[in-house]
Image (spheres, rainbow, N blue to C red):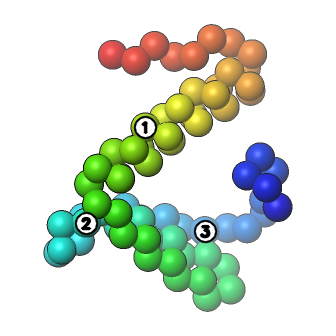
Amino acid sequence: MGIDKQSDIAANIQIGPTDQGMVRIYIEAEGGVDLPLDFDPDEADEIAEELRAAAEAARVMAGGGKPKKRR
C-alpha cells in the first residue's frame, strides 16, 4: 500500500504532550497494534505544517477548487 492509496484499516489516534516535554502521536489499530511516536516540539510543528499542506492538496484534488486561504 502506498501513501496515495485508500485503506480499509481502522485506527484511533491520540495526540498530546508527554511528561518529558515531547509531543506524542499514539496510534492504536486493528490487530493489537499500539504505536507511540514521540517528537520534540519543533518536529511536531513540522508535522503539523505537513498535515495542513496535505489537507489543502486533498481539497484541491477532491473538489478541483482552489486552496482555502489561511489567516
The percent position of residue 34, horizontal first and vertical second, equals 52, 82
Question: Viewer-nearest of labels 2 and 3?
Answer: 2
Picture quadrant where residue 49 is located: top left
Seen at 35% across and 63% down, the residue is: 39
Does any portion of residue 17 appear in the rendered image?
Answer: yes
Judge left or right: residue 54 versus residue 14. right
Q: Quadrant of the C terminus?
A: top left
SS class of the residue under badge 3?
A: strand
Residue type at tag 1: Glu
Q: Earlier in the sequence, mark 1 or mark 2?
A: 2
Residue type at tag 2: Met
Mark 3 and mark 1: span between their CA atoms?
22 Å
Residue type at tag 3: Ala
> Which labelled disc corresponds to residue 22?
2
Picture quadrant where residue 59 is located: top right
Q: Which residue is mark 1?
A: 49
Q: Which residue occupies the extreme bottom position in the image? A: 32
Question: Viewer-nearest of labels 3 and 1?
Answer: 1
Q: Quadrant of the N terminus?
A: bottom right
Q: Earlier in the sequence, mark 2 or mark 3?
A: 3
Circle 1 residues within 10 Å: few <14, some 14–19, many ≥20: few
Seen at 50% across and 40% down, the residue is: 50
Seen at 17% across and 75% down, the residue is: 19
Mark 2 and mark 3: span between their CA atoms?
22 Å
SS class of the residue under badge 2?
A: loop
Q: Which residue is mark 3?
A: 11
Determine contact: label 2, label 3, CB under 8 Å: no
Judge left or right: residue 50 versus residue 48. right
